[in-house]
Image (cartoon, rainbow, N blue to C red):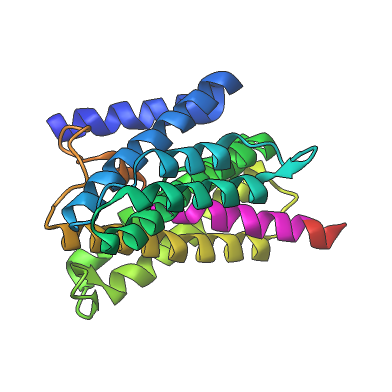
Amino acid sequence: MKRLITAIGLILLALYLIFAAPQAVFISAATLCGVLCYWEYSGLVAKHSIKEPGVFGFLIGLALLFWPTQLPGIDLLAALTLLVLLASVFALRYSDMREVLPQVACALLGGFYAFAPWRFARDLRHESVHLLFFALALNWAGDSTAYYVGRYFGRHRLAPVVSPKKSWEGAIASVAGSVIFGVLYLGHFVPRLQWWEVVGMAMLGNIAGQFGDLVESAMKRGAGLKDSGTIFPGHGGMLDRVDSSLFALPVVYVLYRLLEAFKQ
């Protein structure tokens, strides 16, 4: 019951934020998601016996989320470069020099992993709330299909070391579920996209999301943890809920922008 109540609450909150929330509320929620993802990621890093990435990974993430596309004199790439250099300098305070490289590398990875996808979510919502819902829901639809197909027909393990319960049959069914959902949903709400364009976005977005799930599972398994956190009763942490979306959002955004560019 606790798991069901949490799931219903999360679904209603997600629908509100995607379709009805004012822009300021949506951006605040996206920022909170990034902060929670980074906090849980930092905990996973610590469980790998690496110093937590700390404030510089957080600053890199905020720059990715909020930096304007172009500012006079300095752009996002320059800002990120300076932050990485500063992180490298501050890491010199460690007495064990073997900690410098892993800590700085984890800060850079964490900033991108936890925050950058929410910048793409914001940009997709600016294009269309339906594109954002598609990017988020395609893996929800795929996961539901994969669960039932994998449960009854799964025979061949997809990634036995990382996630022993996942099967190739379930993975293929997940792609099919996402494609069906995408064609039905975007075909109705974003008719300017051709059916084959939607199929390509759904397939690649789903595959990216499945890799996102496996990557987070690998980090948890390496840390010796079942869940990334306990913030959602019965559902684990934020990363456990959005691991697929962190990979699917940038892929869907890039594919959509490429398709739009080719039409001009």
Vertical relation: 205 (above or below) 157? above
On-image quarter of the N terminus: top left
Q: Give the dominant element type of the magenta stretch: helix, strand or loop.
A: helix
Q: Choose between 50 and 195: the one closer to the eye.
A: 50
Image height of 182 relative to 122, above or below: below
Quarter of the rendering occupied by the C terminus: bottom right
**Is residue 50 visible in the rendered structure shown here?**
yes
Query: In the drawing, does residue 80 fall left or right of residue 14?
Result: right
Question: Is 176 in front, or is 84?
Answer: 84
**Residue 219 image point, x, y percent:** 25, 59
Name which quarter of the figure residue 131 lies in: top right
Which of the two residues, 117 or 93, is positioned nearer the viewer here?
93
| 21 drawn magenta | no
The spot of residue 75 in percent (x, y) is 71, 45
Q: Residue 233 location in percent, x, y?
A: 16, 32
Say which residue appears at 37% left-offset and 50% top-offset: 91
Residue 205 on image: x %, y %: 51, 60
Can residue 245 be seen in this snapshot? no
Residue stretch in magenta? 243-260
Magenta-drawn stretch contains 259? yes
Q: Nearer the viewer, residue 127 or 218?
A: 218
- 219 with respect to 81 (left or right): left
